[in-house]
Each structure stands twice: as C-alpha cells, then as structure tokens.
Amino acid sequence: MNGTLSTGAALALVVVFVNYAQQYYQPIMSLTSLYGMIQLAITGARRVDEVRSQPDEIQPKDGKTLPGIKKELQIDDVHFSYLPGKEILHGVSISVHKGEMVALVGPTGSGKTTVMNLLNRFYDVDSGKITIDGTDIREFSLQNLRKNVGIVLQDPQLFSGTIADNIRFGDPNANMDQVIDAAKQANIHDFIMSLPKGYETEVSDEQSVFSAGQKQLMSIARTILTNPQLLILDEATSNVDTVTEANIQAAMDRVIQGRTSFVIAHRLKTILNADKIVVLKDGNIIEQGNHEALLKENGFYAGLYRNQMVTD
Ligand SMILES: Nc1ncnc2c1ncn2[C@@H]1O[C@H](COP(=O)(O)OP(=O)(O)OP(=O)(O)O)[C@@H](O)[C@H]1O
C-alpha cells in the first residue's frame, strides 16, 4: 500500500464518509466541520485501503440481512482493546431480550461508550462475540446492521439547514406531518413552535441557540423517524435545565417503548425501570440486575444511587 489516492477516489470517499457520518452520527454540519470531515475522509480513505489489504476483512462483502431482533441480543465474553496490549473490556457478557432496556452505568472511562461502539461495529471485538438471535453481528452487512441501530448521542450536532431538515434526516421521504408527529413524540414540538420561524428555523453552529438537551430532543425525533430495532442512547449530562430534563425523560421513555435499547445513564433516576442495570468498572462488569436487586446487594450501584439522591 503506498497511501496515495486518486482525486476521484478521494472525493467518492468524502461523499460516502459524509453520508455515513450524517446517517450514523447524526451531526449538524457547518462548513468548518465539513472541512474537518473531508480531512477525516482522506485519512479514512487511507485506512480503508489499509483495512482492505488486511487478510481478515472486517466487513463481509455479502453480509446477511438482519431481519430484526426476534428474541435476544447477546454480548458474550467480549474482550476489546483500542491499542495493542491495552485491553479496555475484559470479558463483558450481557444478554438482553427483545424489547428490554439495558442501562450501563459506571465511572468515567469504565468502558460504557466502548460497549456502544462495539454494538454498532464502529470497532470489532478482539475475542468473544456479539450475536443477534444467535448470529454473530459480523455476519450481517454493515450497512444493514447500522440501518437497524438508532443512536442518540449526548450532545448531537445539528447540520446547516432547517429544523425540519434536521429531523427529516431520519427518513428523507418523511412528509411534514410525520416530521411534526416525531417532534411531538420527542417533546420538542412546542419548543419549535415557540420559535418565530418554527420548523423553518435555520440551524447553524454560529447562530445556534439550542441547549444540549434541546438538540438531544431533536435527535430523538430524528431517531423516531428512523424507527430502529436497536436503540443506543447516551443521555445528556450538561446544560440541561429541569424542564428539558423531564422532557428528555418522557421522550426517552416513549422512544424506548417496545424497542431493545442500551442507555448510558448519567442520572440514575432515569433508569429506575430498566430491565437490567449493568455496572462497569475498569472494563469489568461488577454488578448486574434491576434497581431493586442492586439496592439489596448494597454494593457500588447502591452507593452511587444514595449519593445522587442526596445531591439531586
Ligand atoms: N479511540 C480510543 N482510542 C484509545 N483509547 C480509547 C479510545 N476511546 C476510549 N478509549 C479509552 O477506553 C477507556 C474506556 O473509555 P469509554 O469512553 O468507553 O468510557 P466511558 O465509561 O464511556 O467513559 P465516560 O463516562 O467518560 O464517557 C478509557 O480508558 C478511554 O481512555
């Protein structure tokens, strides 16, 4: 591999990369960030070449189509390292039934985001496996897998365009009624209607007056339009007032309803009803169970909970 790319190939990869980023990272993109994306795309293009030249290709060419989650998703004894010799996850196992909600909690750097990265195959496991109804997720076409996974990030970026454009990203064919319905379900409709131009309000990084919570609600609306099988939610931590926090909670409850979901929870009161709470510490699961069971265990989670109840 000599690391050089034709302009055409680089541009094609830019388009693919930007499409990919918009679809899966759901950002709002300004020209500055687009420039950053182009740089990333070129670096990415080189990486694609590197990956292609490896004998053990990550993406199957003719991957299976994921028919949806019929029964369960299993994370089975997963080990993972970003860098050689520095293992981050040390044998993580979590099983979730269709429609259940799993909450991941744990100190910063414990590996919560890493688990999410593996579920969507931003990275692949070193050993162990992740299966959906018994099939290793590496056997599915990557595009198809990701179509089934909805991600709501902690502080989603909005791209230039109107609020309606931003929500419609979840389904470019959605009509205005569907966009409004998704916004209502995400508890952001009233806020949007309070703006002078409503859904036609232009969004840009410079003029943005939206809080992290409001952006997250728009991202939830976008995800509702995508109608994913598997949902990954990283709850916003900062800049969230109590009204927005309550709105996020209600919107999350609604979007999670009936869907298999993984939630990174920063406020424990948002996950009291989770079917399973998984406590990670230094890449190991140290506790696992529902809220009541973990309180009874009187371990790390119970301490964390009592602490938050005092400070809330
Ligand atoms: N791209 C990366 N390359 C190398 N190391 C990484 C990378 N991403 C995360 N890590 C490391 O992996 C470990 C787990 O990080 P991770 O982001 O999964 O933790 P987290 O529990 O989500 O933390 P937080 O609550 O702060 O978001 C950390 O030590 C982190 O420094």
Image (spheres, grey):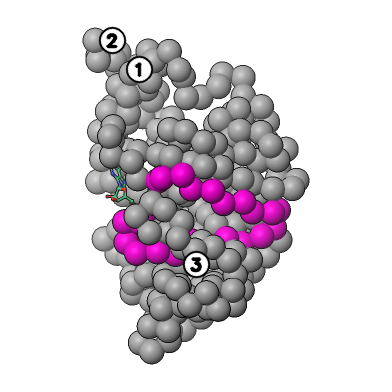
Amino acid beneath label 2: Met
Callout 1 crowding tier (Cα within 10 Å): few <14, some 14–19, many ≥20: some
Residue in view at x 54 percent, y 48 percent: 93
- Residue 265 appears at what percent x and percent y? 46, 67
How far across and down, in percent of the image, does residue 189 sit? 56, 72
Kindly indicate the quadrant of the structure image that contains residue 225: bottom right
Q: Please report the bounds of the magenta region as a residue range.
A: 89-111
Q: Please check the rendered image and state whether residue 275 is part of the magenta-colored stretch, yes or no.
A: no
User: Can residue 255 be seen by looking at this rendering?
Assistant: no
Of callouts 3 and 1, which one flags the residue occurring earlier in the amino acid sequence? 1
For residue 93, say whether it is visible: yes
Which residue type does callout 1 highlight?
Asp
- In this figure, which residue is indicated by the disc labeled 3? 217
Disc 3 residue type?
Leu
Which residue appears farthest toward the top when viewing the image? 1
| Label of residue 94 in the image | none
Q: Nearer the viewer, residue 170 or 305?
A: 305
Residue with the mark numbered 1? 49
Q: Quadrant of the N terminus?
A: top left
Q: Is residue 74 left or right of residue 11?
A: right
Q: Secondary structure at mark 3?
A: helix
Picture quadrant where residue 176 is located? bottom right
The Cα–Cα distance between marks 3 and 1, rounded to whole angstroms, is 37 Å
Query: Do the CB atoms of the residues marked 2 and 1 lie less than 8 Å apart?
Result: yes
- Rendering quarter of residue 273: bottom right
